[in-house]
């Protein structure tokens, strides 16, 4: 009788073990399938936000609510099994149910946040760049401009100037949401320093110019350039005029010194005395008038070898270059006044 009871108990226990093992195996298979299988292979990407300090339970629940994963419980178990709970990074992500939970977790652990693009064209000044940054949602225009003139901040970036005009390198940048104004500016300045190498710094010194003076000249070349191929020629004109102690007489420098310029340069503007009006002052203006690209910086360091002292727009993006004032006057009549 005792033996029969023991036999029945043993069979029941064995059956339970087999059942639990089978259930465990099925559960393991189900979890494995969940980890590897996208919830919706045709789903589009959507923005998903993890806030600072948000718990795994909330993150998993939100992923399920947004239909990015199918099962919040399985996701939590998977995260805990991989010991990734404390590695989930806050930020804004582009996630899709077309990716498996395993792939989604990798994105969250590596902090592959959604990035926003900012493109700064060559030749923009601080105010224009501030507008672009504002439109991208990173910083108010006033805050950006104020930082670019903040002496303490400028000094912290290693720039020897009174403003960051000329040092905000034009390029396409990608930043995550909530990037600070300081970080945006710092990134542009760091890029400038990477482009303006020690070799270029040494070259400027050998030529008898400071980095700031080369950047200033490059900014004028940038603003005067209609056809990129003419940069070295335009550079040569300014170098030749500097050597002869002639005024540079560059319209863009005049415009930079005018508050609320309406787009129409007049004789009264040319006669205004400002630190930037190169019709009135000799040598370079007080500082850069825009933020030049690499090619204009290169042209400022490597002017073409010419005897040109003048150039005038041919109104087709190119210029007519002249060696004498007589040649220049004829070119002005031909291209500006339409007289032969």
Image (spheres, grey):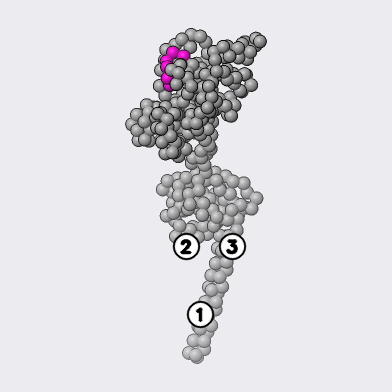
The front one of 255 and 47 is: 255
The residue that label 3 is drawn on is 33
* Distance between mark 2 and mark 3 Cα atoms: 15 Å
Which numbered dot is residue 13?
Answer: 1
Q: Which residues are magenta?
A: 279-284
* Distance between mark 2 and mark 1 Cα atoms: 29 Å
**Which residue occupies 50% across, 60% down?**
78
Disc 2, disc 1: CB below 8 Å? no
Whichever of callouts 3 and 1 sits on the residue coming sooner in the sequence is 1
Looking at the picture, does residue 82 appear above or below residue 312? below
Task: Bin the neighbour count of mark 2 within 10 Å (Cα to Cα): few under 14, some 14-19, many 20 and up.
Answer: few
**Which residue occupies 52% across, 27% down?**
305
Q: Give the residue furthest to the left.
A: 152
**Which residue occupies 49% across, 86% down?**
6
Residue 286 shows up from this direction: yes
Secondary structure of residue under mark 1: helix
The residue that label 2 is drawn on is 81
């Amino acid at each position: 009788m005792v033996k029969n009871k023991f036999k029945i108990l043993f069979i029941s226990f064995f059956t339970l073990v087999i059942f639990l093992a089978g259930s465990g195996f099925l559960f393991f298979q189900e979890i494995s399938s969940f980890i590897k299988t996208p919830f919706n292979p045709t789903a589009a990407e959507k923005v998903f936000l993890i806030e600072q300090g948000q718990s795994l339970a909330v993150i998993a629940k939100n992923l399920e609510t947004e239909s990015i994963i199918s099962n919040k419980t399985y996701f939590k178990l998977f995260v805990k099994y991989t010991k990734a709970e404390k590695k989930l990074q806050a930020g804004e992500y582009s996630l899709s149910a077309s990716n498996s939970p395993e792939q989604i977790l990798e994105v969250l652990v590596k902090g592959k946040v959604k990035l926003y693009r900012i493109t700064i064209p060559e030749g923009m000044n601080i105010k224009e760049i501030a507008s672009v940054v504002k439109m991208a949602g990173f910083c108010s225009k006033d805050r950006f401009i104020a930082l670019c003139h903040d002496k303490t901040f400028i000094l912290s970036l290693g720039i020897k100037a009174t403003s960051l005009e000329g040092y905000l390198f034009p390029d396409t940048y990608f930043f995550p949401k909530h990037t600070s104004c300081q970080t945006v500016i710092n990134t542009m300045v760091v890029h400038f320093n990477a482009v303006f190498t020690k070799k270029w710094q040494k070259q400027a010194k050998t030529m008898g110019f400071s980095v700031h003076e080369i950047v200033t000249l490059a900014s004028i070349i940038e603003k005067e350039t209609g056809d990129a191929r003419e940069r070295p020629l335009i550079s040569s004109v300014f170098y030749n005029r500097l050597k002869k102690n002639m005024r540079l007489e560059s319209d863009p420098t005049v415009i930079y010194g005018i508050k609320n310029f309406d787009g129409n340069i007049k004789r009264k503007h040319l006669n205004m005395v400002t630190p930037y009006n190169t019709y009135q002052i000799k040598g370079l203006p007080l500082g850069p008038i825009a933020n030049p690209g690499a090619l204009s910086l290169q042209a400022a360091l490597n002017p073409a070898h010419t005897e040109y002292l003048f150039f005038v727009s041919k109104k087709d993006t190119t210029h007519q270059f002249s060696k004498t004032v007589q040649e220049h006057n004829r070119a002005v009549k031909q291209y500006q006044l339409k007289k032969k």
